[in-house]
Amino acid sequence: MAAWMDSSIFNYVVLPFIIFLMRLTDVTLMTLRIIFVSKGYKLWSSVMGFFEVSVWLVAISQVMNNLDKPLYAIAYAVGFACGNYLGAYLDEKIALGVNLLQIITNKDAEQLVKYLRDNDFGVTSINAEGARGPVKVIYSVVRRKDLNKIIQIVNEFNPNAFYSVAEVRSVNKGIFPVKTPKDKKLGRFIKNGK
């Protein structure tokens, strides 16, 4: 075993790859932990923080104990970059939370409002005065998971509509489309960690 750990293959292929994987893991966990902290999931963010730091300590100790091997530092840096990418990718897939979608249009919005309501999205619409005349302002608090679908619908009804999206920290009541069984299972699992 000692001979294997002293071999060139272990030192220049296996160990750099392990350092890369550890850094990929700890940075991905860090990204998810920050997301969970921002959403108020204290338990899950604490658990992730424990594993994140544990993995990081092992990875950084390998790099610091082998400063004469720059390949280790490169593997560490590449793992960091890939971990950021993977964390952002997982954030998009998990899509926790809700957003406030504000749509401003100078075209008639009755069909858009009706379509959203018929598809179980809560909608509040008001008449307002814009810079160039009367406009319709539509507000909808939507699950982040549904945001891209709704923006696509808005663009189909009015490609020139102005819209903005804001993150919502908490919501009390409201109308949201029925969750799929998969959404319910994941949501229950994550909410238990609040």
Image (spheres, helix red, strand yellow):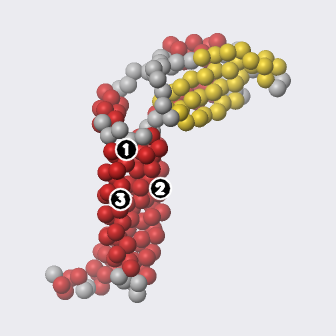
- Which is nearer the N-term, disc 1 or disc 3? 1
- Say which of 53 and 89 sits in front: 53
Rendered image: mark on residue 52: 3
Q: Which residue is mark 2?
A: 85
**Residue 36 x, y percent position in the rendering:** 41, 45
At horizontal 45% and vertical 40% (from top left) the residue drawn is 39
At horizontal 32% and vertical 40% (from top left) the residue drawn is 193
**Eye-nearest disc, 1 or 3:** 1
Q: Amino acid at mark 2?
A: Tyr
Q: Are marks 1 and 2 in contact (CB under 8 Å)?
A: no
Against 20, residue 84 (above or below) is above
Say which element carries label 2: helix
122 lies left or right of 22 = right
**Residue 108 x, y percent position in the rendering:** 70, 14
Crowding at label 2, few (<14), some or many (≥20) Cα neighbours within 10 Å? some
Q: Spatial distance from mark 1 to mark 2, Cα to Cα?
A: 24 Å
Q: Amino acid at mark 1?
A: Lys
**Eye-nearest disc, 2 or 3:** 3
Q: Are marks 2 and 3 in contact (CB under 8 Å)?
A: no
**Residue 67 x, y percent position in the rendering:** 41, 84
At horizontal 83% and vertical 24% (from top left) the residue drawn is 132
Against 192, residue 27 (above or below) is below
The quadrant holding residue 8 is bottom left
- Which is nearer the N-term, disc 1 or disc 2? 1
Against 29, residue 39 (above or below) is above
Viewport quadrant of the N terminus: bottom left
102 lies left or right of 135 = left
Q: Spatial distance from mark 2 to mark 3, Cα to Cα?
A: 16 Å
Q: Are marks 1 and 3 in contact (CB under 8 Å)?
A: no
Q: Spatial distance from mark 1 to mark 3, Cα to Cα?
A: 15 Å
**Eye-nearest disc, 1 or 2:** 1
Q: Which residue is mark 1?
A: 42
